[in-house]
Amino acid sequence: MIELVMVVCLTAVPAQCHEERPMLAVQSVVACATQGQILAARWISEHPAFTLSRWRCEVNRPREERI
């Protein structure tokens, strides 16, 4: 599975950035690249306090979480 990773920053405080990983269920990097642009644009339009600094597609690896 490929995951979309967006780095978004507060418009009012551009140095305050964080990663967002919206749900995107695709199997290839090409699909992530095309659908990721659409999803990133939608996310930014729904969150006007943020600007998109950069984005990438990466292999989704299971995360280890402590219980």
Image (tube, grey):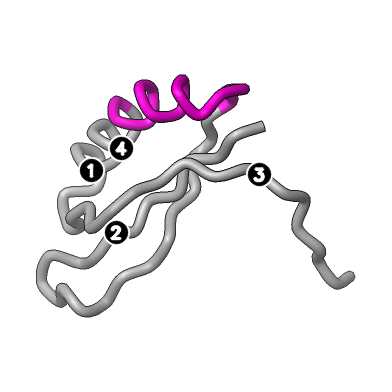
Q: Residue at x 38, y 29 (%)?
A: 33
Circles 2 and 1: CB atoms closer than 8 Å: yes
Label 2 to label 3: alpha-carbon separation? 19 Å
Q: Report the amino acid beneath label 4.
A: Ala
Label 2 to label 1: alpha-carbon separation? 9 Å
Foreground mark, 3 or 1, reads 3
Mark 3 or 1 closer to N-term? 1
Residue assigned mark 3: 60
Circles 4 and 3: CB atoms closer than 8 Å: no
Q: Residue at x 12, y 65 (%)?
A: 11
Q: Report the amino acid beneath label 1.
A: Ile
Residue assigned mark 4: 40
Q: Say which mark, if any, is on residue 8.
A: 2
Classify mark 2: helix, strand or loop.
strand
Q: Quick one: which residue is furthest to the left in this view?
A: 12
Mark 2 or 3 closer to N-term? 2
Circles 3 and 1: CB atoms closer than 8 Å: no
Label 2 to label 4: alpha-carbon separation? 10 Å
Q: Which residues are magenta?
A: 25-38
Mark 2 or 4 closer to N-term? 2
Foreground mark, 4 or 1, reads 4
Classify mark 4: helix, strand or loop.
helix
- Secondary structure mostly taken by the magenta-highlighted segment of the chain: helix
56 versus 29 height, above or below: below
- Is 3 magenta? The answer is no
